[in-house]
Amino acid sequence: TTTANNHDKDGQQNLGLYRRYTAPKRQGDSWRKTIMAKRKKNLSPKHQPWVDARKRFHLSHAHVQMARELGMNPKKLGGKANHKQEPWKVPLPEFIEELYFKRFGKTRPDTVRSVEQILKDKKQKKAERKARKQEERGRQPEPAHDFIKAARPTDELPF
């Protein structure tokens, strides 16, 4: 419903082209899960641009890995991927492959892993390291250098 001044009942500007969708009011926060589209995975700000670039420029996991190894900036790939308007430019996947071959002398990385797989492996390795450290702490006896804890109440203190 719009008023004469092109604003809806919530005060948002309504251009008349589309009706603004408002979600039904429900108890709790669970209604968002049913209405909202798929959300992005909770990746770190360092890795999320690579996932976005992979989807935006239709790159494979190998191309993303090659670009990362080359030290490319995922936010700057748009200027390099403009081969339809600028026909002298090579398509972005081929451009990445050319640079990778010049730098490393091979056409593809030895093992190709997606950004999500790299993060999953890193998280698993961190959990294993944490468990190993806790296990080592559990096996080591408490150091007896604390004189107050080591002395019995009847013993004389060494100071």
Image (cartoon, grey):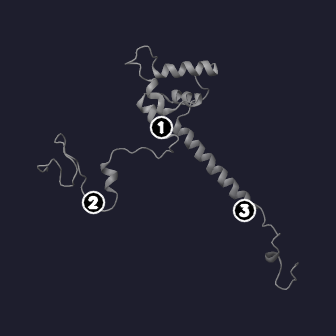
Residue 6 on image: x %, y %:
15, 47
Q: Which mark is residue 143?
A: none
Residue 9 on image: x %, y %:
18, 55
Label 2: how many residues lie within 10 Å, few (<14), some (14-19) or many (20+)? Answer: few
Residue displayed at 45% across by 44% down:
41
- What residue is shown with label 3? 138
133 lies above or below 104: below
Residue 80 on image: x %, y %:
46, 24
Q: What residue type is labelled 3?
A: Gly
- Residue 111 picture quarter: top right
Q: Residue 26 carries which label?
A: 2
Marks 1 and 2, how far apart at CA: 34 Å
Q: What residue type is labelled 2?
A: Arg
Q: What residue type is labelled 1?
A: Pro
Determine the secondary structure under disc 1.
helix
140 lies above or below 21: below
Q: Which residue lies furthest to the left in this view?
A: 4
The mark that comes first in sequence, 2 or 3, is 2
Residue 95 on image: x %, y %:
51, 20
- Give the foreground label among 2 and 3: 2
Marks 2 and 3, how far apart at CA: 48 Å
Q: Could you tell whether 6 is left or right of 146 in the image?
A: left
Q: Which mark is residue 49?
A: 1
